Image: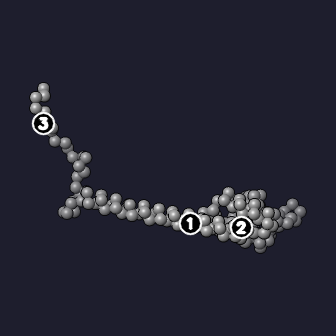
């Protein structure tokens, strides 16, 4: 299949496919004259790359995989699994941070409601915006 068909099957642009090829994420396809001819393996690899990107991997993060793949002449499954495990740990840490932020926001909302709501369901005036009372002159001041 030609690059247009590969793009259609994967939802990827031809430009992105050429980039994946250029940086070594997918193997260079065979050629028929000046046209690249892709196969089912290329479809699977582009789907895998797109899925990794959707999971938060940047192309630059795939560099070690490319180097290992080129050195081993095989896909470095152990290295790929380790990268996924590391990404999952990052995601879990971010989840904990977001959960802590959610608890903080809940407390902020509760504090605002306690501070600015009376028991009559009428909002209380903000103390900072009330008209200040006259301050009596200090004794003995002119």
Q: Mark 2 or mark 3, which is nearer to you? A: 3
On screen, residue 116 versus residue 61, left or right, reads left
Residue pushed farthest bottom? Answer: 40
Find numbered disc 2 in the image and state the secondary structure of the residue it sits on: helix
Point out residue 4 in the picture as x, y percentages from the top left corner: 75, 65
Point out residue 48 in the picture as x, y percentages from the top left corner: 69, 69
Nearer to us in this view, 130 or 140: 140
Q: CA distance from mark 1 to mark 3?
A: 63 Å
Cβ–Cβ under 8 Å for marks 2 and 1: no
Q: Residue at x 12, y 36 (%)?
A: 136
Q: Residue at x 30, y 59 (%)?
A: 111
Residue ID for mark 2: 46
Q: Mark 2 vs mark 3: which is more N-terminal? A: 2
Point out residue 137 in the picture as x, y percentages from the top left corner: 13, 33
Label annotation for residue 136: 3
Q: Residues within 10 Å of mark 3 (few under 14, many from 20)?
A: few
Q: Residue at x 89, y 63 (%)?
A: 33
Residue pushed farthest left? Answer: 139
Residue ID for mark 1: 89
The quadrant of the image that shows the C terminus is: top left
Q: Residue at x 77, y 73 (%)?
A: 40
Q: Mark 1 or mark 3, which is nearer to you? A: 1
Find numbered disc 3 in the image and state the secondary structure of the residue it sits on: loop
Find numbered disc 1 in the image and state the secondary structure of the residue it sits on: helix
The quadrant of the image that shows the N terminus is: bottom right
Q: CA distance from mark 2 to mark 1?
A: 25 Å
Q: Quadrant of residue 60?
A: bottom right
Nearer to us in this view, 1 or 130: 130
On screen, residue 15 versus residue 31, left or right, reads left
Nearer to us in this view, 58 or 117: 58
Residue pushed farthest top? Answer: 142
Q: Mark 1 vs mark 3: which is more N-terminal? A: 1
């Amino acid at each position: 299949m030609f690059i247009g068909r590969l793009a259609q099957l994967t939802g990827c642009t031809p430009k992105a496919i050429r980039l994946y090829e250029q940086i070594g994420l997918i193997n260079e396809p065979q050629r028929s004259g000046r046209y690249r001819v892709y196969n089912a393996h290329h479809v699977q690899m582009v789907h895998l790359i797109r899925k990794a990107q959707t999971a938060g991997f940047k192309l630059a993060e795939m560099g070690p995989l490319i180097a290992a793949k080129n050195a081993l002449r095989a896909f470095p499954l152990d290295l790929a699994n380790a990268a996924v495990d590391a990404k999952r740990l990052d995601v879990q840490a971010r989840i904990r941070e977001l959960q802590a932020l959610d608890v903080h926001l809940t407390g902020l909302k509760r504090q605002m409601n306690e501070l600015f709501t009376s028991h009559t369901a009428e909002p209380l005036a903000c103390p900072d915006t009330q008209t200040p009372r006259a301050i009596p002159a200090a004794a003995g001041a002119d």
